Every structure is written in structure tokens, then in C-alpha cells.
Amino acid sequence: MSNSQNFLYLKVKDFIVTSCRENGWEVLLPHFERTVHWVKELKPNADESLLIAAFSHDCERIFKSRQQVIKLPKGSKSLSENDQLQKHQDDSVRIIADFLVRQGADDKITERVKMLVSKHEIGGNADQNLLKDADSLSFFENNISFFVEEVVSQRGKEAVRKKFDGMFNRISFPEAKEIAWPMYQQALAMLSE
């Protein structure tokens, strides 16, 4: 990356890190960092927009409580899983796009980041699929303990198993699936303990 590109990426990273710390979500930082790592592993020539999207793809979670992330608050209407994923993607797009606009980012960068983050859970084109796969790899590296220790008590083992299965099965690229396989197996072993 050139210095000007590096500067924008570093501004995004600082925004995400600061927001995580201010909102008690430091636990998310390794996930963001490793998503960037996996993007670079799977696509060594990844552009700045893809790296920004990788570091900010789940940014809406930073501004929620742990309870909101684990399950919907009591008395709320439940959204379907697809609706929840779409809302998560849309809210993350809004947050990172607003930040990029405030920083005076080039419209092409902002639009590309929005396009990438808008499908990071479900995929679409090759780069959206790459981001989704990197997100899954990082999920298995960083989030399994959280799900086993905190989410199981709220939603049950079957729901967590479904999440683990979904995160593995959504991986598009064979290389990423091969990397994820032992992590997925370890996650299932931890869940069954």
C-alpha cells in the first residue's frame, strides 16, 4: 500500500480499535486483525478497500451490548436469521461508510468498501466471498471460546452447533475450507465437552 492508502487504512483501524475500547469490546479486536490476516493470506495483493472492509466488517457489533449480540432482548420481535444477517451487514455498511465520508475518502474506495461489507456474511462476487471466507477463518480462531462459554448458556448447544456448521459450510474457496477444517473440528470437540 502507498502512504496515502496506508493512512486511510490506519485511520479506519484507529476508529475501530478506539470504538472497541470505549464500548468494552476489546475481545473483537483479534477477530478484526485475523480477518485482515486471512484476506492477505488468501489474496496477497488485496487492495486497500478489501483490507478496510476486513477490519471493519462487523463494526455494528461494537455499538451493541453483549446481551444484544448473544440474543434479542426480552419482549422484542425475533427476526429471521436471514433478516438478522442483512440488518447486521446494512448497519455495518452505514457505520463504516459514514466514517469514510467524514475522513474525505475517495468515493471509489467508499463504494467498494460498502459493496464488500454489504455481503460479508453471505458472499456474492469473488472479493465478497473472499471476505466471507476470511471472516469464517478468523471466527474459528477467535470466537469459539466466546460461543462455548457464553452463547451456549443463552441459546443452547444446538444453536451454537448450527452456527459452527454455518460458518464452516459458507466457506467458498477450497483453500480456505482446507485451512478451516481442523479449526471447525476443534470447535465441535469443545462444544461436546
Image: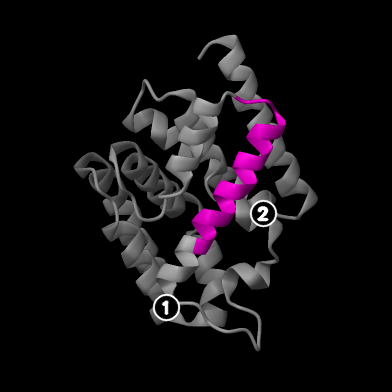
* Residue 130 in view: yes
Against 81, is 86 above or below? above
Q: Nearer the viewer, residue 120 or 191?
A: 120
Q: Which amino acid lies under the numbered mark 1 shown in the image of this protein?
A: Ala
* Residue receiving disc 2: 62
Report the residue at 36% width, 42% height from top.
128
Report how far apart the C-alphas of labels 1 and 2 lie in the structure: 22 Å
Quadrant of residue 16 within the rendered picture: top right
Against 189, is 99 above or below? above
Q: Secondary structure at mark 2?
A: helix
Against 104, is 1 above or below? above
Q: Residue furthest right?
A: 22
Residue 3: where, in percent of width, then height?
60, 10
Residue 173: where, in percent of width, then height?
23, 43
Report the residue at 50% width, 77% height from top.
79
Residue 191: where, in percent of width, then height?
41, 72
> Which residues fall within the magenta stretch?
87-105
